[in-house]
Amino acid sequence: MKKITSVFALIFTFAALSVLSVTAQSFAPRASVTPLTLEQKANKELRKLPRYSVFDYIEVEVNGSTVTLTGKVCSLGTKNQAANFIKDIDGVREVINNIDELPPSSFDNRIRREAYHTFTNRGPGQYFSEINPDVRIIVERGRITLEGFVYRKADSDTLNILANGIDGVFQVTNNLIVGKRDY
């Protein structure tokens, strides 16, 4: 009988220690996620989007645990996919999706094709890799907006001049940043 009591005492002690261990782990402070880290993780996730092309541009803004997505996409479903990719990141509590979906337009599609062809053949084509390009070409109602990063001011100027020479373009906005992107 004394042996059985000792075994029960041992089992009870083990169970109590296990519960305390689990409780202590659940209340342990988590490593804090800084806004910069959250932004880097979000940008990394966006690069995994299957239809995120040179003609789409998504910007990430972090405020606490809220991530706001802005930009313009022409690929069908990319807006919702972007929000779904971001919401599963550790530390994200809310995703505000302000991405604009560009309407389908054969006129804009022609400008997109011509701009891409012109930039890669007559300009600094190194910025237009198929996966995660440094420069994005946004075309909306005959207006081109250049977004992204270039290494030299001369490259930004060259792309701006080439964009203005594309037939059917009404306006060019050059938002290119000179320098290396930080993600």
Image (cartoon, grey):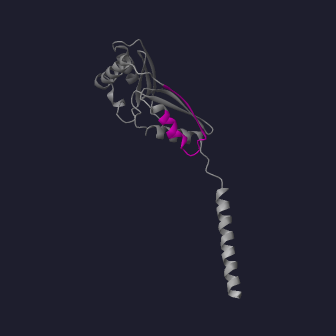
Task: Give the left or right position of residue 154, taking residue 69 as reference.
Answer: left
Q: Quadrant of residue 109?
A: top left
Write the residue at 36% across / 16% down. Answer: 107
Q: In the displayed image of the protein, which residue is found farthest to the left?
A: 121
Rendered location of residue 168, percent (x, y): 36, 12
Rendered location of residue 81, percent (x, y): 47, 36
The number of numbered discs placed on residues in the rendered structure image is: 0
Task: Give the left or right position of residue 69, taking residue 18 as reference.
Answer: left
Q: Is residue 116 above or below residue 62?
A: above
Write the residue at 67% across / 78% down. Answer: 10
**Residue nearest the viewer, comparing 179 with 143:** 143
Write the residue at 34% across / 34% down. Answer: 130
Rendered location of residue 160, percent (x, y): 39, 18
**Residue nearest the viewer, comparing 130 with 2:** 2
**Residue nearest the viewer, comparing 118 with 139:** 139
Q: Which residues are magenta?
A: 80-100
**Residue nearest the viewer, comparing 183 with 144:** 144
Write the residue at 69% across / 74% down. Answer: 12
Q: Quadrant of residue 66?
A: top right
Rendered location of residue 167, percent (x, y): 33, 12
Q: Assign the N terminus to one quadrant of the image.
A: bottom right
Is residue 38 highlighted in magenta?
A: no
